[in-house]
């Protein structure tokens, strides 16, 4: 074999594995990203990323814990509310072991016997223990939600009700139980006084019920309208909408134009820590000379005079104060023509949370 032939044979006898290995290593080196030091711009961007405020973190933690507690208590409540039914006696199984040749043969089905009727119907009343447990759980969930509403801002409350829509029903079930213990309900006072109010001849009396609950005020007043005379127009706002009367929103910003209301009502609904924003929104939607009516729990006021001063600073004038009820205090204000400058004195809270004790 000559020298040219040997070179050609040697060139053709190279191992393919060696060739693929070197090719893969080149691709790997090509694909590996180059490690570069972070640029000055990247360092400044990461350093300037705003950290979440401590207050926001606390609020998020409280909301998360409340949602977890609601989920757990709901599961317990559902399991405890199931009526106890008597166990159905099952027929005793035969102790005779069948032989293999018997298993292969089809056995005739025994005649169907009538199943015993359960002595406990589906809508049976709960036992005393179950009823007591359900009441305790309902009361506990109501107190948790109530505390959350009083100790956080309204925007967090809106998020809570969106994430757990059943929260509204749980809260108002507990609220109705509390109302039964009261000597009177402030909503009834507003229904009575507004029903007797002087109605304009040319248009209905326009009312905004802020934090309306299940819209008892609207349902009562609107039922007095007739085809001949529409006495009332009622706008009802709350965190959730349980019926067709209620618009779900944050009551610090309701979907109404400026100066369209004759009366704004807060019946035990100054609940968020930002309740001053609720009152400023009431000033916005009231016409000049419009009425602001408030009912609140007496024990919430560290200093009633300071509360009145705060509303005067917003742009209201006190016309009437009724403290004859031991539980509630009633205020009537008029909107003045010009909003005053807000004060900065926050040394003492104007209202404290209304927290229910465990009974």
Image (cartoon, helix red, strand yellow):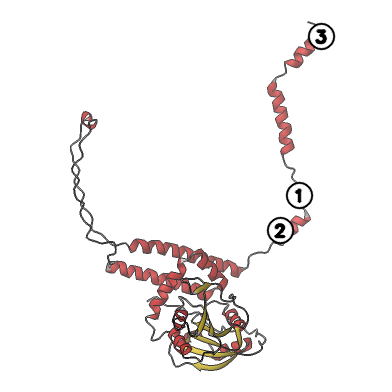
* Image quarter hosting the N terminus: top right
Dot 3 or dot 1: first in sequence order is: 3
Q: Viewer-proximal residue, 329 or 4?
A: 329
* Image quarter hosting the C terminus: bottom left
Q: Is residue 313 visible?
A: yes
Q: Is label 1 in a helix, a strand or a loop?
A: loop
Name above or below for residue 178 compared with residue 107.
Answer: below
Q: Residue furthest top?
A: 1
Dot 2 or dot 1: first in sequence order is: 1
The residue drawn where x is 21% and y is 56% is 117
Query: Where residue 334 sits in the image (x, y, percent)?
Result: 58, 90
Determine contact: label 3, label 1, CB under 8 Å: no
Residue indicated by mark 1: 37
The residue drawn where x is 72% and y is 38% is 31
Residue indicated by mark 3: 3
Crowdedness near tag 3: few (<14), some (14–19) or many (≥20) residues, C-alpha within 10 Å: few
Q: Viewer-proximal residue, 75 or 41?
A: 75
Q: Is label 3 in a helix, a strand or a loop?
A: helix
Query: Where residue 309 sits in the image (x, y, percent)?
Result: 60, 90
Q: Is residue 190 left or right of residue 315?
A: left
Foreground: disc 2 or disc 1: 2
Question: Cα distance, mark 3 to mark 1?
Answer: 55 Å
Residue indicated by mark 2: 46
Dot 2 or dot 3: first in sequence order is: 3
Q: Is label 2 in a helix, a strand or a loop?
A: helix
Q: Is residue 301 visible?
A: no
């Amino acid at each position: 074999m000559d020298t040219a032939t040997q070179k050609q044979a040697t060139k053709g006898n190279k191992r393919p594995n060696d060739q693929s290995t070197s090719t893969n290593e080149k691709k790997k080196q090509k694909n590996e990203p180059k490690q570069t030091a972070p640029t000055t711009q990247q360092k400044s961007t990461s350093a300037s990323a705003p950290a979440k405020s401590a207050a926001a973190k606390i609020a998020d933690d409280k909301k998360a814990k409340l949602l977890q507690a609601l989920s757990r208590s709901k599961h317990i409540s559902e399991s405890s509310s199931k009526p106890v039914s008597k166990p159905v006696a099952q027929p005793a199984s035969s102790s005779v072991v069948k032989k293999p040749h018997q298993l292969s043969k089809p056995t005739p089905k025994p005649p169907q016997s009538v199943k015993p009727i359960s002595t406990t119907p589906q809508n049976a009343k709960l036992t005393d223990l179950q009823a007591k447990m359900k009441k305790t759980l309902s009361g506990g969930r109501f107190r948790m939600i109530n505390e959350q509403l009083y100790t956080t801002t309204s925007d967090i409350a809106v998020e809570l009700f969106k994430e757990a829509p059943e929260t509204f029903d749980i809260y108002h079930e507990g609220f109705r139980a509390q109302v039964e213990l009261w000597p009177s309900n402030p909503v009834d006072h507003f229904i009575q006084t507004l029903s007797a109010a002087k109605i304009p001849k040319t248009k209905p009396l326009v009312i905004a019920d802020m934090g309306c609950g299940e819209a008892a005020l609207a349902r009562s007043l609107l039922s007095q309208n007739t085809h001949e005379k529409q006495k009332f127009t009622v706008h009802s706002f709350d965190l959730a909408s349980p019926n067709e009367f209620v618009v779900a929103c944050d009551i610090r910003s309701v979907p109404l134009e400026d100066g369209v209301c004759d009366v704004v009502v807060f019946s035990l609904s100054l609940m968020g820590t930002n309740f001053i924003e609720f009152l400023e929104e009431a000033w916005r939607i009231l016409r000049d000379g419009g009425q602001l009516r408030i009912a609140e729990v007496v024990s919430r006021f560290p200093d009633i005079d300071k509360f009145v001063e705060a509303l005067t600073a917003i742009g209201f004038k006190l016309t009437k104060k009724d403290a004859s009820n031991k539980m509630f205090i009633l205020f009537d204000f008029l909107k003045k023509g010009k909003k005053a400058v807000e004060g900065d004195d926050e040394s003492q809270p104007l209202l404290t949370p209304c927290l229910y004790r465990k009974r």
